[in-house]
Amino acid sequence: MERRFSMIKVLVNGACGRMGSEVVRTLEVEKDLQLIAAVDPQHAGGNLGMLTRTNYKDIPIYKNLNEALTICVPDVVIDFTTPSIIKESAKTVISKGIHMVIGTTGLTVEDREELSNMVDITGSHVLIAPNFSLGAVLLIKVSAEIAKYMPNTEIIELHHNHKYDAPSGTAKLTAEKIAEARILTAEKDNTKESLIGARGGKYHDITIHSVRLPGYVAHQEVLFGGHGETLTIKHDSLDRKSFMPGVMLAVKNIFKHPGLVYGLENYLE
């Protein structure tokens, strides 16, 4: 059901991390979104304003979601934490019937199915998005279209060296969409590896190469090979600010999308 009143109350889980801090700074300038609480176990009880360079000095930082949701009731929880805790965090939020925007990667297909079953019972609306950059979302959509005609493809994704998982959720979603869209069969790769892993890893029968180096934020290339030609499409997120329009779009539109939705592209009108 679409929301009928203006101010949306938000809790940020992982509020003092790299992405969480950027979300907090963005919320400060959003007129129809109200930050009411933050969760970050390493900074519980601290000054959110000082930690995120905002004016949110009076917003409480709780140690965990259970504590926070006992005291306050947000309309939407935004989660940018870690793969090791995201499933339990999602269960906690969904069990209370609260909507949730998840940017944390690491949830498997089985995890998503389990959470979807919970959502059907509690009525929460949940968006799980491997990438909130609008450019990256468009890259995925275009890749799926190209794959209908050029089925031979590989993905190279490059991220900072503190990223928890490999391959990235964006690369995996891209591979899924390409696999679904391919009409023609890709030609067999007969290369013999002299070094194990040199050819990357397979996901939905599509090769993905992961690079982790200081200096990168989030980058992806999708390479298509044909007879006598190649086509490469590339997206670069040069700053975490690039994800914020997508996160804000998700929070404002989550009331229109019941159930569990996977991928921000489903929110684009």
Image (tube, helix red, strand yellow):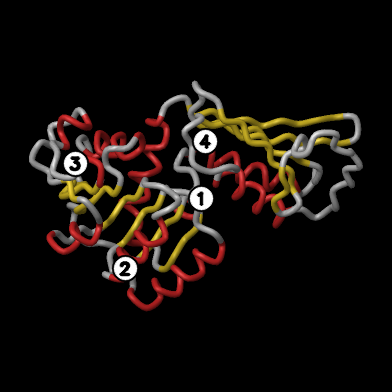
Amino acid type shown at disc 4: Gly
Residue placed under numbered mark 2 in the picture: 1
Residue 169 horizontal/vertical position (percent): 55, 47
The one nearer the camera, 174 or 210, is 210
Q: Judging from the image, what secondary structure is the residue with disc 2 in?
A: loop
- The quarter of the image holding the N terminus is bottom left
Crowding at mark 2 (Cα within 10 Å: few <14, some 14-19, many 20+): few
Does 9 appear above or below 234? below
Q: Which amino acid does the dot numbered 2 rest on?
A: Met
**Foreground: 262 or 215?**
215
Q: Which sits earlier in the primary sequence, circle 4 or circle 3?
A: 3
How much space separates mark 4 and mark 2, taking CA atoms?
A: 28 Å
Residue extending furthest toward the bottom: 121
Around disc 3, counting alpha carbons within 10 Å, would you say few (fewer than 14), some (14 to 19), or many (20 or more)?
Answer: few
The answer to whether residue 13 shows anywhere in this view is yes
Please say if 94 is above or below 269.
below
> Which residue is denoted by mark 3 in the rendering?
31
Q: Disc 3 to disc 2, how far (Cα)?
A: 22 Å
SS class, disc 4 = helix
In the structure shown, which secondary structural element does the residue marked by tag 3 occupy? Answer: loop
Q: Disc 4 marks which residue? A: 135
